[in-house]
Image (tube, rainbow, N blue to C red):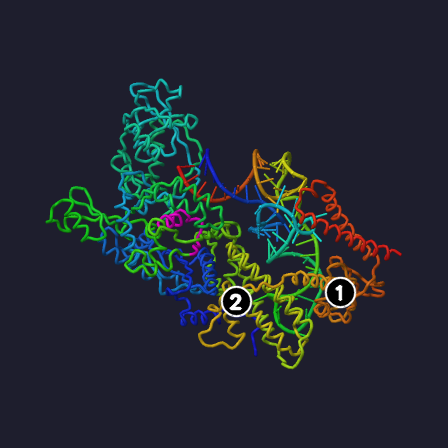
Amino acid sequence: MEIASKYNPSATEDKWYKYWMDNEFFKSVPDEREPYTIVIPPPNVTGVLHMGHMLNNTIQDILIRRARMMGKNACWVPGTDHASIATEAKVVNKLKEQGIDKKQLSRDAFLDHAWDWTKEHGGIILQQLKKLGASCDWDRESFTMDKVRSDAVIKVFVDLFEKGYIYRGVRMVNWDCKALTAVSDEEVIYKEVQSKLYYLNYQIEGSDEFVTIATTRPETILGDTAVCINPNDERFTHLKGKRVLVPLINRSIPIIEDEYVDMEFGTGCLKITPAHDINDYEIGMRHNLESINIFNDNGTLSEAAELYIGEDRFDVRDKIIPALKEAGSLAKIEDYTNKVGYSERTDVVIEPKLSAQWFLKMEELAKPALEAVMSDEVEFHPKKFKNVYRHWMENVKDWCISRQLWWGHRIPVYYLSDGSYVVAENDEKALTLAKEKTGNTALTMADIKQDEDVLDTWASSWLWPLSVFDGYGEDQTEIDYYYPTNDLVTGHDIIFFWVARMIIAGYEYKGTFPFKNVYFTGMVRDKQRRKMSKSLGNSPDPLDLIAKYGADGVRVGMLLCSPAGGDLLFDENLPEQGRNFANKIWNAFRLVKGWEIDENIEQPESAKQAIAWFDAKLDQTIATMNDHFEKYRISDALMTVYTVFWQEFSSWYLEAVKPAYQKPLDAATYKATSEFFDKLLRLLHPFMPFLSEELWQALEERQEGESIMVSEMPTVKGLDASIIDKFEMLKEGVGGVRTIRKEKNIPMKDALSLSIFAGEGFTPDFNAVLCKLANLNELNMVNEKVEGAVSFMVRTSEYFVPMEGLIDVEAELEKLTKELAHQEGFLKGVMKKLGNERFVSSAPEAVVAKERQKQADAEAKIKTLTESIARLKK
RNA sequence: GGGCGAUUAGCUCAGUUGGUUUAGAGCACUUGGUUUACACCCAAGGGGUCGGGGGUUCGACUCCCUCAUCGCCCA
């Protein structure tokens, strides 16, 4: 059978993905088996696949494939979210390109365009995930705005309103002047910027004196309604009760006193602009100040500003400074570094703005969700995120859930002509409620008007683990079976946006957690620790990587350096390493499949020994991997099987059983080897689904409809592990001989003779393997030192390779002396411990015994080395 | 300004309730290799006073304090 010397992923990946789909292996329906469920963090419809998705979904696929092989009913639900702000922005831009202004369209006409856009672009990421091998149940694909999910969102709004958790209030919100909507606190990103601190003089009314205030936003003076001092500040005692004039517009405003003012900062005098700063707003409330809103929604100045009407807020800042200077109001300008909030969506500076919005009260709802995480009912991996979570939950703020947009779930609030309102799931119910409320049975839909705004996208995502199983529908079969889900895999950057809120919703609506475990991935960065971004151009296209290194190679690459929660520094040498590993497996398979099998020849002793060892080694490997998976150390689990396949299986086992060139292999050894290979492929399958399927199908004759992905994951047999340590001794022996060959320039093909003076713990169990791998023509067990030989030690046994005339006495002496010094140093450390009364009396017995064993071993080695040195010196 | 976390080999990280041969892995590096599975390979090797200082302990990479540096979250 001819097999190419290099693995070619592109030839196999599409073939097996289609095979899996055709056989419906990804599909899950409730049955009597234990369910294992993951809901995908829904990528938003405007996105394209990036490295973060690759990492995230690779991990989910590993977990789900493993669970499936462990006999569970594995269900991975895919889907997307509608990304209210981002999608609306995309659609508005697209319409603009076509010469259409959103304002000219009706709500329904705009939504038609948005749906068209979503249908065209929405599923791209999910299609790309198939290339990665994602084994999602595609029949379950959900969208936050489809019928089932939308109904859930509206039902929940009505329910929370009826429970008294939702209220409408005029508050200071984070206003996005580009998207023209409020955004939540979580959607504001604070960045440190170099700015200026402007010192401005305000003339005291009826006097030539003035006070100086410091501000970073001089344009907001037009909205000032007070100047504030600290009542304890003696510098300003004389100002109490006076009034000052706002520069340029000469508005008379009071000087008020409030302890909020930091006497150390700036001049100790603070201007108060209640409409445009959250702290000023609170001070304004305390002192009954007027709020003057000087901005329009798009960030230009309004009529209320009196000056610069219609001009952009940043242009005004540039213009007002010369004007203030000319008016003699500018005292000085200093450089200043401060943090400014930017919109996560549009990257424009957030403008604090007073407006009427809908809020969700969080305090009560958050309690069970906080408790659940602190008590590990929901487990975070890594644990350190528990602290972050607690801090947020204990200080949780009410959630601003309304957005001034059209694309999303329209708020089910209906206003009556008198300004009162009713809340209902649909028009019909709203009308009924309105009639009840007013006692006017003649009301029609024309008399009530639904709120124009939509809900925050996260107000639908937070229901995701419930809504994808139609948790708010009539038929509860699915939710009863799949909920709670098992694992959630997501980036730690959305712990508040999404994870915390899902946990809250889970407890509120099902009385229990939405998922048992949360695995937080790190952020994918480039080698220089920069975030991957389009503008930097430092993010590779995942599909290009797959084409270059194969999906399995990329999956392995993503995982090789991704401890939970830590940042992942991506570099192309990672998928390259993954590809190399795939090729290693491919070639090991090529070797095994290339052997000719002879039923009649006897199994060599060396093969028997190697099989006994690798059987135990594999058993231990499975146990180690299980342990890693239980603790969500997924990259460690991969590293375990990586090392075992490459080092133990390929470099030791296969070399030990490999027949001589062009000689056949006995049937028993082939059978054992084939079984080992089969198990290794199964262990590898969750990480490398395509290659493992390709080889598993070729390893034996398989029936149509068979697949490694639905085969059983190997389990621990509980074999005696002591053989593994004995084999390590054999490796040291082989290594010793190899070193001698290298030092003496003896090629591998020249057979050598070896004598072993056995020390404590020596085992002859692997002598046959030793002869084969060290290429020995003679192996003698001796009871005394061998003259005229090069020697080395394996633990307390001494190995001799006779080498008449080739011995470099000086070099041997140097080697032995160095080793002796090391052993003596080591013994000294051990003796120091054992010489300490308090160590011997207070350390556990086992620890002391271990030290005594170290002492005995070291003394035996020192004795041997001393004798050998003396002999050489003769 | 408040809080959290980190600092171990050139790089990225393990180190699992303080005791397994005076610290481990992967990558990178050095040396040697046309062995008939694989150069996307094989064999061997170098490299760290575990950020600094102090303390607790018979014993500290591991626990406590402190300083320094960095990162993240929140205001």
Q: Is residue A500 magenta?
A: yes
State which quarter of the image contains the N terminus of chain A.
Answer: bottom right
**Is residue A259 visible from the viewing direction of this image?**
yes
Please state the horizontal and vertical placement of residue B5, each as a whole percent of the image. Answer: 52, 43
Q: Are marks 1 and 2 in contact (CB under 8 Å)?
A: no
Q: Is residue B49 left or right of residue A317?
A: right
Seen from this angle, which residue lies furthest bottom?
Answer: A600
Which mark is on residue A682?
2
State which quarter of the image contains the C terminus of chain A.
Answer: bottom right
Please tell me which residue lies in front, A779 or A412. A779
- In whole angstroms, how far apart are the C-alphas of marks 1 and 2? 38 Å
The residue located at (18%, 53%) in the rendering is A428
Q: Is residue A297 left or right of residue B65?
A: left
The kind of residue tagged 2 is Arg
Q: Secondary structure at mark 1?
A: helix
Which residue bears the numbered disc 1? A741
Please tell me which residue lies in front, A51 or A783. A783
Question: Eyeballing the image, is A246 above or below A69?
Answer: above
Please state the horizontal and vertical placement of residue A757, each as a whole percent of the image. Answer: 79, 62
- Disc 2 chain ID: A
The residue located at (34%, 48%) in the rendering is A508
- Disc 1 chain ID: A
Seen from this angle, which residue lies furthest right?
Answer: A874
Magenta residues, start to end:
A486-505
Q: Is residue A566 magenta?
A: no
Please state the horizontal and vertical placement of residue A540, each as a whole percent of the image. Answer: 47, 58
The kind of residue tagged 1 is Arg
